[in-house]
Image (tube, rainbow, N blue to C red):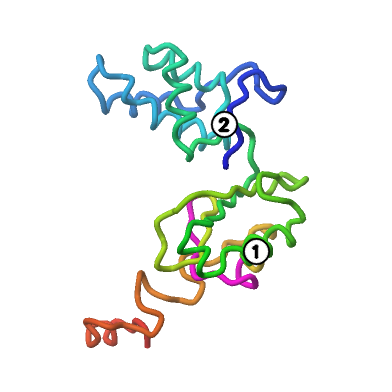
Amino acid sequence: MKPKFEPNADYQPKDFSFKSQKKVKDILANYPSNQARSGIMPLLDLAQRQEGWISRVAMDCIAEAVGQPPIKVYEVATFYTMYNLAPVGKYLVQLCTTTPCWLCGSAAIIEAVETHLEIKVGESTKDGLFTLLEVECLGACVNAPMVQINDNYYEDLTAESIVSILTALAAGKKPSIGSQTKRVGSMALSGPTSLEKQAKKAGVGS
């Protein structure tokens, strides 16, 4: 679960402003002037991409931009799990433990991650690089077990491959995203089962 919204916590900053007012205007321009509140979600995303998380003052700033009471922004931000309402590490590791991933070994993935980073789910490393969260289904069930790290999916994981990914990220490298077994899309583990000639021509599963 993600950290709860604590509007009066010590880590809450006193001020916030968007670095790009043009991006704010571009977002609001997508909606009729009397429906500016429709821009709440993309503005929350913009704030999170700027700061890594969304503070109370950021939500207040968004409320002012869309002409709504702050509570209207709080309601949206606290409802959706993709918004981080407390500081997180540079790499937010979201560990899926829903049934398909669990059946395919997500428990071993979590154990490997916690052991390697020396933290538990819900915690962050002391260097501020990694934060671990346990989440519900991320929609890549056929390539389970998988994790989401920031915007990227890492699929078909083993305890060894997830440690390699974390090690690469810590070193400033960019590990390969997607299937760690080079599986293409939702292809069967045994290889293509349809359009085999086209797959062979494209070099898929060969």
Residue 69 lies, with reference to residue 18, above or below; the image says above
The answer to which of 26 and 130 lies nearer the viewer is 130
Mark 1: secondary structure? helix
Q: Residue at x 33, y 28 (%)?
A: 26
Q: Read off the residue under disc 1.
A: 168
Q: Residue at x 58, y 27 (%)?
A: 5
Mark 2 residue type: Leu
Q: Residue 171 at what x, y percent from top left?
A: 69, 60
Q: Decide if residue 138 is on the left or right side of residue 191.
A: right
Residue 51 lies, with reference to residue 89, above or below; the image says above
Q: Quadrant of residue 10?
A: top right
Mark 1 residue type: Ala
Q: Residue 133 at what x, y percent from top left?
A: 60, 47
Residue 136, magenta (yes or no): no
Q: Residue 140 at what x, y percent from top left?
A: 41, 61
The answer to which of 127 and 118 lies nearer the viewer is 118
How dense is the environment of label 1, judged by Cα within 10 Å: few (below 14), some, or many (20 and up)? some
Q: Residue 23 at what x, y percent from top left?
A: 40, 29
Residue 155, magenta (yes or no): yes
The answer to which of 90 and 97 lies nearer the viewer is 97
Q: Residue at x 56, y 18 (%)?
A: 57
User: What range of the chain is rendered magenta?
Assistant: 151-162
Q: Decide if residue 120 is on the left or right side of residue 147.
A: right
Q: Residue at x 53, y 63 (%)?
A: 102
Q: Read off the residue under disc 2.
A: 85
The answer to which of 153 and 100 lies nearer the viewer is 100
Q: Decide if residue 107 is on the left or right side of residue 44.
A: right
Q: Which quarter of the rendered picture does the C terminus lie within?
A: bottom left
Residue 195 lies, with reference to residue 186, above or below; the image says below
How dense is the environment of label 2, judged by Cα within 10 Å: few (below 14), some, or many (20 and up)? many
